[in-house]
Image (cartoon, rainbow, N blue to C red):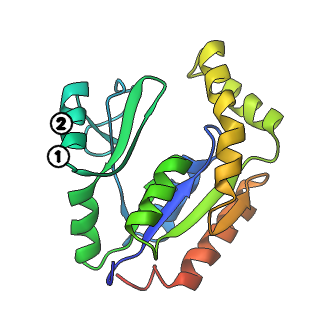
């Protein structure tokens, strides 16, 4: 990590985490994106190696057994995780790297890289979060309820992050995130 900075962005589903990560990558083009591995099916428009590394369950479990993941978790019957060799290569090359992961994954990354920067994106309220998930239109009511059951745990663990940003107004939230990254100097480390 001496060269690059791991930057973790976590949030409950629907709080704006992916939108914020994409904005970070546009604002700081030299920061790399950590492509997570998953066993979940590919969604329309997703590409292997760009959005996720799509692995079979047996391949993912083989990588767990071989210690090839910095962090992983089984969520909604699918595995999600971060491949150790991809992160180490990026950091060793002197590039900072941004992670779009859940709170447990973020805390595991902090254990692996104690100097990592952890940013938690909090929704303005649980009801706003529920409405955002409904408006996405990508999940059934049952899937939304499953996601909502995780929210109390995510909000509680988010308190352990270095920074908590309330995403009630996207432009303001982005401005705060950019200031945090600039203050840590990760945009200059490339």
Q: Residue furthest front?
A: 65
- Look at the image and tell me whether residue 15 can be seen: no
Q: Toward which corner of the image does residue 138 lie, by quadrant?
A: top right
Q: Is residue 36 left or right of residue 153?
A: left
Q: Quadrant of the N terminus?
A: bottom left
Q: Toward which corner of the image does residue 60 lie, by quadrant?
A: top left
The residue that disc 2 covers is 62
- Look at the image and tell me whether residue 92 can be seen: yes
Report crowding for label 2: few under 14, some 14 to 19, many 20 or more residues within 10 A (C-alpha). Answer: few
Q: Is residue 124 left or right of residue 113?
A: right
Q: Is residue 9 left or right of residue 3?
A: right
User: Residue at 43% across / 85% down in the picture?
Assistant: 188
Q: Position of residue 135 (x, y in %)?
A: 69, 27
User: Residue at 49% across / 56% down in the picture?
Assistant: 106
Name the residue nearer the viewer: 14 or 64: 64
Name the residue nearer the viewer: 22 or 38: 38
**Is label 1 in a helix, a strand or a loop?**
loop
User: Residue at 82% across / 42% down in the picture?
Assistant: 125
Q: Position of residue 175 (x, y in %)?
A: 68, 69
User: Residue at 63% across / 42% down in the picture?
Assistant: 12
The residue that disc 1 covers is 66
């Amino acid at each position: 990590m001496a060269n690059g900075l791991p930057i973790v962005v976590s949030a409950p589903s629907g709080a704006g985490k992916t939108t914020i990560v994409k904005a970070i990558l546009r604002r700081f083009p030299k920061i790399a994106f950590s492509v997570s591995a998953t066993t979940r099916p590919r969604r329309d428009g997703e590409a292997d190696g760009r959005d996720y590394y799509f692995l079979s369950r047996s391949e993912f479990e083989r990588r767990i057994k071989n210690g090839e993941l910095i962090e992983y978790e089984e969520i909604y019957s699918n595995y999600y995780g971060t491949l150790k060799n991809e992160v180490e290569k990026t950091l060793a090359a002197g590039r900072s790297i941004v992670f779009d992961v859940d709170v447990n994954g973020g805390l595991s990354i902090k254990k692996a890289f104690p100097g990592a920067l952890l940013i938690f994106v909090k929704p303005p309220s649980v009801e706003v979060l529920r409405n955002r998930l409904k408006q996405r239109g990508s999940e059934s009511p049952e899937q939304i309820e499953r996601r909502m059951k995780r929210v109390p745990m995510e909000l509680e663990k988010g308190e352990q992050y270095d920074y908590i940003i309330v995403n009630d107004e996207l432009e303001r939230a982005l401005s705060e995130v950019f200031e945090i990254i600039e203050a840590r100097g990760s945009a200059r480390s490339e």
